Image (cartoon, helix red, strand yellow):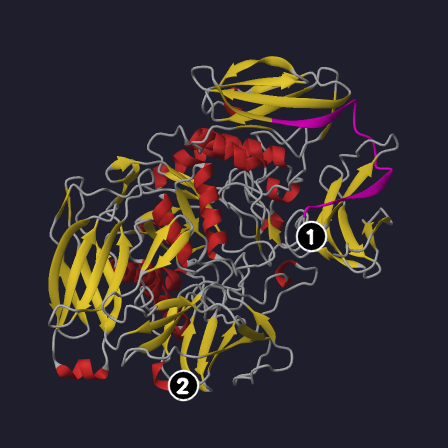
Amino acid sequence: MQRAEELSSPSGTALFFCGAFFYLLFSTAWASALQEKQLFNSDWEYLQDERLSPPSLDAAGATDVTLPHTWNATDTVDAQPGYRRGAGWYSKRFRIAENLPTGTRHKLYFEGANQKAQVYLNGREIGEHIGGYLGFTVELTEHLQPDADNLVQVRVSNEYDRNLIPSQKADFFIHGGLTRDVWLQQLPAEHIQSVTITTPNVSRESAQTKVQITLDKSSAARTSGKAARLQLTLLDPAGKTVSSSETEIDGEQGEAELPPLQQPQLWSPDSPALYTLVTELQDTDGKTLHQHRERFGYRWFEMRPNQGFFVNGKRVLIRGTHRHEEHAGIGAAMSNDQHRADMLQMKRMGANFVRLAHYPQDPEIYRAADELGLILWDELPWCRGGMGGEEWKENTERLLRQQIAQNFNHPSIAFWSLGNEIYWEEDFPGGGDDAVVLPYLKHLNKVAKELDPQRMTTIRKYYPGAEVVDAFSPSVWAGWYGGAYGQYEAALEDAMGKYPAFLHMEYGGSSHRGRHTETPIDKNGIPDAQVSVTEAMNQAVVKSVAKDSDWNENYMVNLFDWHLSVSEGTEHFAGNAQWAFKDFGTPLRPENPVPYINQKGLVDRAGNPKDAYYVFASYWADTPFCWIESHTWTVRFGPESGRPVKVYCNTDSAELFLNGKSLGKKKRKPGQFPAHGLVWQVPFKEGENQLRAVGRNAAGKQIAEDGYDLTYHLGEPDKTEKVVLNAIRTASGDYLITAEARDKQGRRAINFSERAYFSVLNGGGELVENQGTYSGSSSIEMANGLATIQFKPGNRPAVVEFRTQNIKGAYIELPAARSH
């Protein structure tokens, strides 16, 4: 059996990216009609089966699937505890094109198989890969049937294995399956396997470029003793040739250095300039046998002690967030468009930094970061569990080496993270002890620095490792897991004093969309809470906002507003990254308002913004906007004097209108808490009210606006009398069902927050559930007296039931689906 190759990129890869689309480039001299890399995602058959040997095609229970695919698309967030950790088989019949050039070789490149994969061709095992989140290549050539159908089969398993990172105790799901793209490569007998580009000396005046090339030679080429001839051409960001040089390689690996580049266009978050190196393998007559293209950038990153983070010699404040690789309804099996949409949404918010939590992610993420100018923290999946034995250490080091090799050329990567909370909840007896963890961490740091001396190593929340790596993040969760958000400035000053190369990864808290209060916890926190802002491993023994509050959105808006006002104004601070951009699934939080969902996202699991998203945009975004807090706060109670209203804008000034009447103009004062000073006392009238905000530039021209309607009631909310269901038909033909708690006067009972349960009584359709979203969860806590669920009608009328612990039942009848 052949072990799968662990390559820096797919052999023969030749991709140009333009927006969200890509174009295949063909090798001009070697079989110009041959498509050397093509998607291999369609027409797979999936069989959920634990067997160890390949099943027959069309086996009982098999289903047709298109990759990417995971068998954990919805079971992670359903009502049943746990999720499937096991094996599945992927099978595909295919035929190789006829009339290919003599000596053509065929390979499959898997962008990821989570977490273990064994690959079979025509019943013979030809390769394996251990470890999810990274790509691998398997050669098909030797066992292909050239003029007949071929059958490729892949056994993938995500079953529990404590010798493989991340730990079972990590706060995210480990989705099983072929969760990323698969490519069929058709290559000449001798071809370029990988090109690694280093830029050891870069300045604004000049740049040095070194290249390491690995060839994959046929056995005849290896024994011939002839040197391989290579042509190297450097293209600038506009595609213009900058330099051209030749070199020869004796054997399968070689190095070259390009002529010094004068006045390089530097890559940065504001100007992500990308160069392209074209490497051509030629015969003795100069004929191109194979061509390889690799994009990269010239830049340099620094953490200057007690001065902050620098890009190309200029201080840059890290304005960051985090990303997990999953989406509502599909888990980790995201398309490239969905990956890129996440990155675009972060960039539009104004972020310049993304920590990839807690594992290497899809290749599209790195391409998007390169193009958009998003600095990356790329993290080894050593997340909790402590250290294991020899098998664990071998797996972990191999994955680090593969991760660095695979992602090396991406200019967006500034940090190689060696792990997160690595000592927590040890999986092996004694595996969390510093005496064993620290020496191994030092070893991994040495490996990373040997493989890549230019980039910085990092780690989060392993304090003995602070002096090992180049940059360090302790645990600071002011106002959530400990302390109050008013302590954030003091916490930063303390950390900056302890750690010369300090940056702050992870802060924030959870918010249940649509849940609001007129009296959120203030900057002083809650009485008798844990004083320390460091997250305690055992939350059961501490009192905190995380554990002892209702997760309303108003509090999170204020917490983020305060954090940003501090971080944006703290001298010499490197910057921070909010946790996390998007709600994501976790096995560790079954009793959250949305079960099994970590609700710390600025957007929900489907990418819809929550209130806190607009706080960040008001500090960071370039596109003018205004947003009134809050579009989901549509029923309020209070005195005749009204209630305060905050407006988050990035414009020079704003004006607020109530029912068409101006309440005055205010000049935005950046960083003033709250809302940059854009707060109005609004004298709402009883009943329906309309709010409208207008944002203006320095010249007084209107450049942004926002508005919505709300209902205001004088006095205090009353107790719940009943729950009423209604439904509206959506453009897709489904229904959006809303459950509304009402008091005896028929007003919304905004204090009702019990857990709601939706079900279909008669099989006349189905709920769109197990999505982990606010309208895709059949079990969800009410938010200000509301809960929603989507319903897909069937071929006969249906009855949908609503229940809580104390509401014994509310019902709605819905018609059958419309016939066409």
**Where residue 70 sits: x, y (%)?**
55, 66
**Which of the labelled discs sits on residue 777, or is there none?**
1
**Which of the labelled discs sits on residue 57, or is there none?**
none
**Where residue 759 sits: x, y (%)?**
79, 56
Q: What distance separates the C-alpha of mark 1 from that of mark 2?
A: 50 Å
- Quarter of the image for the C terminus: give it: bottom right
Q: As shown in the figure, which amino acid type bears the numbered disc 1?
A: Ser
Residue 718 lies within the magenta run? yes
Q: As shown in the figure, which amino acid type bears the numbered disc 2?
A: Asp
- In the depicted view, which residue is nearer to us: 32 or 222? 32
Identify which residue is drawn at 39% across, 62% down: 437
Disc 2: CA contacts within 10 A as few (<14), some (14-19) or many (>=20): few
Specify the quadrant of the image occupied by residue 217.
bottom left
Eyeballing the image, is 223 above or below 498?
Answer: below
Q: Name the main secondary structure of what is drawn in magenta.
A: strand
Figure disc tally: 2
Eyeballing the image, is 225 above or below 666?
Answer: below
Eyeballing the image, is 566 above or below 23?
Answer: above
**Where residue 346 sits: x, y (%)?**
46, 42
- Quarter of the image for the N terminus: give it: bottom left
Identify which residue is drawn at 49% across, 70% down: 162
- Secondary structure beneath dot 1 equals loop
The residue identified by callout 2 is 147
Is 469 displayed left or right of 432 in the figure? Answer: left
Residue 588 lies within the magenta run? no
Is 747 displayed left or right of 232 in the figure? Answer: right
- Magenta-tinted stretch: 707-731
Circle 1 or circle 2, nearest the eye: 2
Identify which residue is drawn at 33% across, 79% down: 99
Disc 1: CA contacts within 10 A as few (<14), some (14-19) or many (>=20): many
